[in-house]
Amino acid sequence: MSDDFTPDQKRYLEGFTSGMQSARAARGLAPLGGAGGGTPPAGPDREHLEAQERAVAAGGKLVPQEKWKQAEHPFDAYARFKAQAATGAFPKPEDDFRWRYHGLFYVAPAQNSYMCRLRIPNGILNAWQFEGVADLAERCGGGYSHVTTRANLQIREISGENAPSLLEGLADLGLTAKGSGADNIRNVTGSATAGIDPLELLDTRPHARAWHHHILNDRSLYGLPRKFNVAFDGAGSIATLEDTNDIGFQAIDVLEGASCDGQPVEPGIWYRLALGGITGHKDLARDTGVIVAPSDAIAVADAIVRVFIAHGDRTDRNKARLKYVLDAWGFETFLTAVEEKLGRRLLRLDGAFVAPRPVYDRLAHIGVHAQAQAGLNWIGVALPVGKLTVPQMRVIAAIARQCGDGDIRLTVWQNLLISGVPDAKIEDALANLQAAGLSAETSILRAGLIACTGATGCKFAGAHTKEDALAIAAHCEPRIALDQAVNIHLTGCHNSCAQHYIGDIGLIGQKVPVGDEGDTVPGYNVLVGGGYGVEGGIGRELLTHVKAEEAPAIVEAILRSWQSHRAAPDESFVAFARRHEIAALRALVTEAGEAA
């Protein structure tokens, strides 16, 4: 070491270098300076490091995010995050990526602040936790929260200085945001009415919670090639949209006489396994033919994720989802790899031995509904495109404590349920909701209106989706009366957070060219005929470059064309849309618009 350093400086540098070498060794990386070449990766990140090495050995070039993971694992950087936050500074791109492992997203230039996305397994939290989140949103954020399409909560407008206090405040509430962003397994969804639904086949709460804790307590399940979604659907009244997930566990009733490879299969409730959903890439999860005992779901999910860790693409972010492994390998090859991880065969079962699943009630997330427990009800609260103010959150928490069972259940439809409300307390609960500017009643149109954050809070969005969604409702409600549920999804960009491809009507934000000077204004491309569950399918593009200000009248014309040209009074919108070629639909919509 150079004599230019004092003895104290030398000792500091030696200690610093030793610490860096130890940290790299713990992550399975070679020592700085290139010594120890050829040492196999070790430690909790071994599977990821091996996958990165294989990608490079095959001639690939790791994307920047993979290199950032190698240089410093986000969970090893919390002290540096806190030091950065203390200065009020916001992160550069590599740290923006790392802090997402802690649930924080730097959303500039839309807002010069963080957004925090929580983890709430099965979307259920206690009233006191919900009230605690309200306190954090008031103290550390913008004084409101959003319910998301993963039955989750987001807090926005968090300053750099307040970010650590918010994360640590969540921990004090028994909540976390760990792994809710970046290349990790996102919030675990389950049936909103789990355990209280008279129609359900299975209570998903134990499985969603077990998977949640399985992830949280195993560092090797972080740092995947890309984000990963898992959902458990118990076949209750409210759709969980499990077919939009990488892994969808669908509760089914296996009939008497079922067999697999000549061996009898016990009748009763199982999960059916669907894989590869990613609606932003125009694909729903496909049935694998595999059935899984509910008690085995966590082991099977773990094996699937580990095959993805080993073989997902780390050189192309656009192809780094499970769908693309399935597309390249085929389902049987992939399932064989899963079986090798498990060390046993998976059960396949012909669909003929599965009873038809109960039909979803597309309006069951709004209003008062009787529970399986006699004399008790859930109340579905209508939220304007998922937004809640802090005072409203406190009122909801109080209602859940005083009138319900203390649980608040978030749904994938951007609203929430208050459960366990006795018949005698329904009117009290409804009156208190009304006093807070909320309601358990809304129009059919608003009940199916879904919107992501949009350009107001997201740098990727091409339009102000939440505001435009409310403008569509305000325009259409006095002009057209709906007699059937219709879902209208507005998403700001191709990340498809609002899942526009599965909407009866889907709008995706675009910059619409205007004039001859290259100027643009916010707007949308419009799709029709998407669906989920038994009506699963990807919407088809109907119109392009629709200015945002024109979207309400366009949606009205689309709805009018359906009502005027239904094959029968009960023909659903999706059936109507799929019955027509796009050119014919376009002509009908133009006609309806001109007649309006």
Image (tube, rainbow, N blue to C red):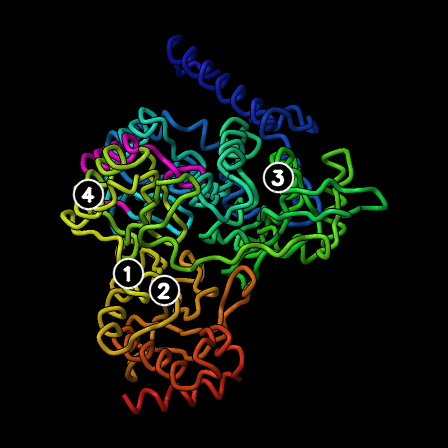
The structure residue drawn at horizontal position 30% and vertical position 31%, both measured from the top left corner, is 129
The structure residue drawn at horizontal position 25% and vertical position 37%, both measured from the top left corner, is 403
**Circle 3 SS class:** helix
The residue pinned by badge 1 equals 466
Among the two numbered marks 3 and 1 on one chain, the one whose residue lies closer to the N terminus:
3
Q: Position of residue 488 (x, y in %)?
A: 37, 67
Identify whether 401 is placed above or below 550. Answer: above
**Circle 1 SS class:** helix
The residue pinned by badge 4 equals 428
**Marks 4, 1: nearer the viewer:** 4
Q: Which mark is residue 301?
A: 3
Report, in whole angstroms, how far the alpha carbon at label 2 lies from the one at label 1: 8 Å
What residue span does the magenta drawing correspond to? 118-145
Determine whether, in the image, residue 3 is placed left or right of residue 343: left
Report, in whole angstroms, how far the alpha carbon at label 3 lies from the one at label 1: 34 Å
Identify whether 219 is placed above or below 565. Answer: above
Q: Which mark is residue 490?
A: 2
Give the quarter of the figure containing the C terminus.
bottom left
